[in-house]
Image (spheres, rainbow, N blue to C red):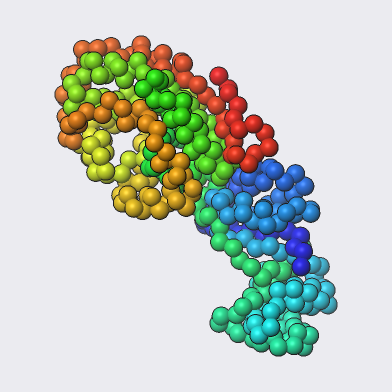
Amino acid sequence: MNYDRILIRYGEISTKGRNRNKFVEKLRKSVRSALAPFPKIKVEASRDRMYVLLNGENGIEIIEKLKNIFGIQSFSPAIKVDRDVEVLKQTSLELVHSLYREGQTFKITPKRSDKTFELNTDGINQTIGGHLLKNIPGLKVDVRDPDINLRIEVRKEAIYLSCETIQGAGGLPIGSSGKAMLMLSGGIDSPVAGYLAMKRGLEIEAVHFFSPPFTSERSKEKVIDLSKKLAEIYGSITLHIVPFTDIQQAIREQIPENYSMTTTRRMMLRITDEIRKNHEGLAIVTGESLGQVASQTIESMYAINEVTNTPVLRPLITMDKTDIIKIAQEIDTLEISNRPFEDCCTIFVPSSPKTKPKREKVQHYESFFDFEPMLHEAVQETETIVIKPDNEKDSDFNVLF
């Protein structure tokens, strides 16, 4: 059976009130962007449903794309038919017959959104069910655990038939919660944090700190590849690559070793905040998990956060490492993160970093050196590129400046 469309059901969007149309439009944009490689498709959106009209495009490939789009609760390959009982009977028979294997069972799940249709839900069950049983030998009814569940949705404009419900990614459409900067290292945690932030509707721009020659071009490629994986969700992602060598060397020379990690994180946060301002972001996202390393104790976060009033979002804050790794596997970033190329967070690591740094002490140590000109220069020299997934037909990324 050739499906002609895919019916998309909203999840959390359905709970929205007067703002629902804004969320629907964000989702439509996400779907349109993710399905850009399929030029013949058409996306139709209403307050209650969204449809992808296939127009001959590869439905299997499109289904794989839809699975990763936030804001979709579930979706079904579907057929649209006229509001005519005889047409409904014939199309239902063709659909179920195309799926039926000997000994299988079925049930019908009708939804009559338009009460003016001539058959009520019981009438749909009896009329369509009887027609199927009469014309498919061996087919039996099982209302609890059927092999085939024929969903019939009666709406004002037409009737929609489907037999498969595919789980979506859930969450909110990307961009519906604003924009944030993701501090993206080459490790396991930060890509997962970015993924979870996007699931809550945030549009993400990534910020990576690059310290050549101490970090190699392979380290930079690693972060670009991680960005490509995140870009698969929305179609593209902006990556800001910050030159950080001079600042790291100054920290190494000017700050006591056991406080150098604290100051490094403070400088990174200050730079990220400036980039956020320049690109109209509203928050910063990090991959911190409470107690995982020295810079992620509550005392360290207290000392580091002082440099900004911007909300710092930590999606992984209460998660175990095993849970984070599991998500990294699911989103296909784990193997990339495990490549043996160091980033600037892993070089110059002190032998005994302070796990309970004091704000007053780090302020005191930083007061002997003016980091401001170096921070300003790092922001000015930041390289910004727009990255697309590997399967995009265009180039993998475009340098903006």
Q: Residue at x 74, y 49 (%)?
A: 41
x, y (%) of residue 59? 71, 56
Q: Quadrant of residue 242?
A: top left
x, y (%) of residue 118? 77, 77
Q: Residue at x 53, y 31 (%)?
A: 238
64 left or right, relative to 243:
right
- Quadrant placement of the N terminus: bottom right
x, y (%) of residue 54? 75, 54
Q: Residue at x 57, y 33 (%)?
A: 387
Of the pair 33 and 23, the residue shown nearer to us: 33
The vertical placement of 312 against 91, above or below, is above
* Residue furthest out toward the front: 340
The vertical placement of 237 against 289, above or below, is above
The vertical placement of 74 against 260, above or below, is below
54 left or right, relative to 111:
right
Q: Quadrant of residue 80?
A: bottom right
- Quadrant placement of the C terminus: top right
Q: Residue at x 39, y 25 (%)?
A: 215
Residue 212 appears in the figure: yes
